[in-house]
Structure formats: C-alpha cells, structure tokens
Image (cartoon, grey):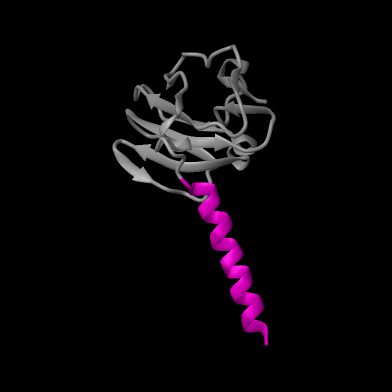
Amino acid sequence: MKRPVIGKLAGLAIAGLSAVVALPAHGATLLTKGTNLPTLVLSAGKAFPKEAMQLEAGKYYRWKIESDGTSEMAIQAPEFFRFIWINEVVINDIEVRPLGLHSLEFDAKGSATISFVPIRPGEYEYFMPNSKSDAFRGKIVVK
C-alpha cells in the first residue's frame, strides 16, 4: 500500500531537484556566473580588511584565502559557514566537496578557495582563533 505514495514522493523529489539544476535555454548556470571576492591574505602582523564584505543571498561567490607561511594561521567563521551552501573548497589545486565548514588552518604557505552560495541574510564575523586583537576580525554582510 505504501509503495505508490513512496513512488510519488520520489518522483516529486526528482522533479523538484531537476527544476533546481535545470539549465536555462542559453546554457548558463548559477555556478558559471560566480563573483570572485577579494583575496584574504593571512600573514603575521597583517590585519584583516576593515570594510565588510557585501554579499547577496542566492548568488554564487568564490573567496580565496592565502597564507604567506610566516606563521601558523587560521580563519574561523562558524556562523557564516553554517548559512552557506558550499560547492567546493579547492586546497592547493585539490578539490574537496564538504558538507560543511567551520574553519581553515594553514600550517605553511598555501591557498584555499571556497566556492559558495549564501543562504541566509545577516551579519557574520570571521576571525583568527585565539587572537584578542580586533585587527584579526572581519565582517560579512549578506543581504
């Protein structure tokens, strides 16, 4: 008895998913129209940008984070990372497709690029863990 209902639900789920990923007539997709955000450079003694990053919910972005290797450094943005859909994180040319993200830590020189879509509007903070200085705090505003 329950099979027809399950079959209908599966059909609706597949139809809904295909509607989300369907290609427009001109062939462009959300993921090909991404915006490259300014690179965040992690360097001993170099402060994070003072101006907030302005983003729009539902748009696709790529954010490159680089470490110059002067010190072991990390960036955390737990609230922001919780409210984005992550397509991939490219770490030194290796593509990773995580279900979520809490922080990135660099033990040596390297880079990581996060490709994502913000889901929830709000104001979020990114910061260097264990730093008491406001110089290592940044802000992201999603409208």
- Whether residue 4 appears in magenta in the rendering, the answer is yes
Tell me what residue is drawn at x 63 percent, y 80 percent: 4
Badge count: 0
Q: Quadrant of residue 139?
A: top right
The extreme front residue here reads 25
Task: Give the magenta part as a residue range.
Answer: 1-22
Q: Quadrant of the C terminus?
A: top right
Query: Measured from the top left, where is residue 109 in percent x and y?
Result: 32, 28
Residue at horizontal 62 percent and vertical 76 percent from the top: 6
Quarter of the picture holding the N terminus:
bottom right
Task: Report if residue 55 lies within the magenta region.
Answer: no
Q: Which one is in front, 13 or 70?
A: 13
Q: Position of residue 140 (x, y in %)?
A: 61, 24
Main secondary structure of the magenta stretch = helix
Of residues 32 and 37, the one drawn nearer to the viewer in this rendering:
32
> How far from the left and from the top, in percent, is residue 11?
57, 67
Q: Residue furthest left?
A: 93
Residue 78 occupies quadrant: top right
Q: Residue at x 62, y 42 (%)?
A: 82
